[in-house]
Image: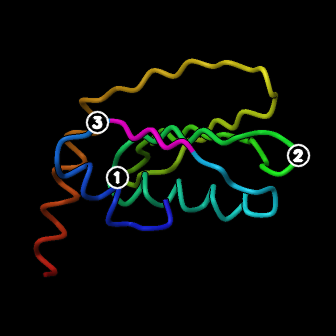
């Protein structure tokens, strides 16, 4: 998630959801969550970022969905705090496809 081109490249090649298994140490969880949210916003794509949970790695896996409010996209996060928790998340992929196409076409005007 640190490198923006990875998610951008996958989104441009047609990925509809990004799954990112991770090994983030405890002290890096907060910035990692920011990276994941930023990549989702930049590319208008939902991201599921699973993290290892043990003595060294901090867990706190995150699912980032986006919601639109007054033509502004905001992250809607679900953070998993329990070691044995399971969760489901439904994404409306059609809304992402349209907003992603608009986002990428806007980007071309500034190149």
Q: Residue at x 56, y 37 (%)?
A: 63
Would you name the residue on which mark 3 appears?
16
Secondary structure mostly seen in magenta is strand
Looking at the rendered image, the quarter that the C terminus falls into is bottom left
Label 1: state its secondary structure: loop
Quick check: is 106 in the magenta stretch? no
C-alpha separation, residue under disc 3 versus residue under disc 1: 21 Å
Answer with the quarter of the image where residue 21 lies. Answer: top right
Residue under label 2, please give it: 55
Mark 2 residue crowding within 10 angstroms, few (<14) / some (14–19) / many (20+): few
- Rendered residue at 79%/34% (across/down): 81
Q: Is 110 on the left or on the right of 61, as rendered?
A: left
20 in magenta: yes
Lower sequence index among marks 3 and 2: 3
Q: How is the image coloured?
A: rainbow
Looking at the image, which residue is at 29% across and 39% down? 96
């Amino acid at each position: 998630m640190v490198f923006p081109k990875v998610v951008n490249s996958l989104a441009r090649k047609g990925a509809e959801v990004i799954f990112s298994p991770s090994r983030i140490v405890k002290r890096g969880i907060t910035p990692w969550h920011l990276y994941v949210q930023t990549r989702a916003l930049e590319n208008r794509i939902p991201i599921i970022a699973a993290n290892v949970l043990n003595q060294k790695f901090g867990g706190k896996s995150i699912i980032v969905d986006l919601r639109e409010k007054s033509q502004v996209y905001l992250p809607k996060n679900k953070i998993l705090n329990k070691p044995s928790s399971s969760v489901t998340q439904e994404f409306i992929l059609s809304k992402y496809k349209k907003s992603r196409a608009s986002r990428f076409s806007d980007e071309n005007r500034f190149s």
